[in-house]
Amino acid sequence: MKMQGGSAPADARDPHAYSDGYQLGVGQYALGSARHLHMADEHTFAAVLVDRLEWAHANGANAANWEAQAWFGGTYNRLVIKTEGEAAGGKVHDARTELLWGHAIAPYWDTQLGWRNDVGSGRPARNWLAFGVQGLVPYWFEVDATAYVGDSGRTALRLSAEYELLITQRLILQPRIEANLYGRNDPETGTGSGLSSGAVGLRLRYEINRQFAPYIGVERYQTFGNTSDMVRAAGGRSGETRFVAGVRLWF
């Protein structure tokens, strides 16, 4: 019986070389023309999440609200687009759009750097440089904190947090809180310095599937300080309780 050993056949593959590669010399290898295997963090992904697309009723008036974000990229770097606003009577009263570059800095945490644009019916547009963080804190609270710098020395800070409480695998209760702060008064847009506005809401949704989930809820919106004074001076209400019904979509 012939013992194992001797020289390998001339066309044998080196077990330490990459697929389709070849050996240049001792400890040196080159890849072939095609690479078929990729690491998980080399793939490109895309997603769209419409977190709120809802009808809201308060003080005898109706409005449509939305909040959504989309991203495209890999594990570490992504292009992120965020939008949020309110429309009523055929007009967009307040809308915020952000174009951001997101970079992962830790598990479940991204930094975001980019541009924000604010528009609304009867009010001048405002543009900001944005820098923030988005991620999960212990106990799975989703947190979004972004600071803004605008022209003429304007500054702003936006904070939001939400949590998903699973009553069943399909029925989910989502509390949410949001606060907006500004560094100086801006009478043209009706925003005052300090804590300007905030909202606390509770939404109950039913996930028919992960991509489609109708919900109902209630939310309290309140203005504060100088912003509240400007709203009342213009004949508006400083705060209101809204009843909402909508749908959450994910693509």
Image: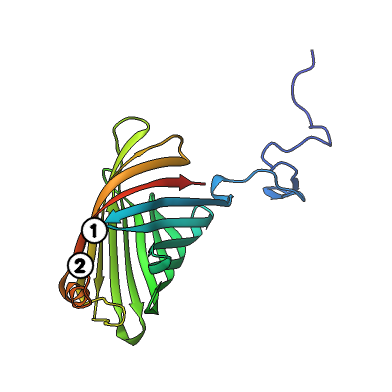
Residue, far front = 60
Q: Residue at left 65%, top 43%? A: 37
Q: Position of residue 61 (x, y in %)?
A: 30, 59
**Residue nearest the observer in this picture, 243 or 15:** 243
Q: Is residue 241 left or right of residue 166?
A: left
> Which is more N-terminal, label 1 or label 2?
1
Q: CA distance from mark 2 to mark 1?
A: 10 Å
Q: Residue at left 69%, top 42%? A: 17
**Residue nearest the observer in this picture, 64 or 79:** 64
Which amino acid does the dot numbered 1 rest on?
Asn
Circle 2: is it few (<14), some (14-19), or many (20+) Cα within 10 Å? some
Circle 1: is it few (<14), some (14-19), or many (20+) Cα within 10 Å? few
Residue 201 visible in the displayed image = no
Q: Is residue 123 above or below residue 42?
A: below
Query: Which label sits in the foreground, 2 or 1?
Result: 1
Asked if disc 2 and disc 1 are in contact, CB closer than 8 Å, the reply is yes
**Residue nearest the observer in this picture, 98 or 38:** 98
**Circle 2 is placed at which residue position?**
237
Q: Residue at left 40%, top 57%? A: 66
Q: Position of residue 156 (x, y in %)?
A: 29, 73
Colour scheme shown? rainbow
Q: Position of residue 240 (x, y in %)?
A: 21, 59
Task: For mark 1, give the secondary structure.
Answer: loop
Q: Residue at left 19%, top 67%? A: 238
**Circle 1 is placed at which residue position?**
59
Where residue 145 sits, quadrant-wise, is bottom left
Task: For mark 2, give the secondary structure.
Answer: loop
Q: Position of residue 225 (x, y in %)?
A: 15, 73
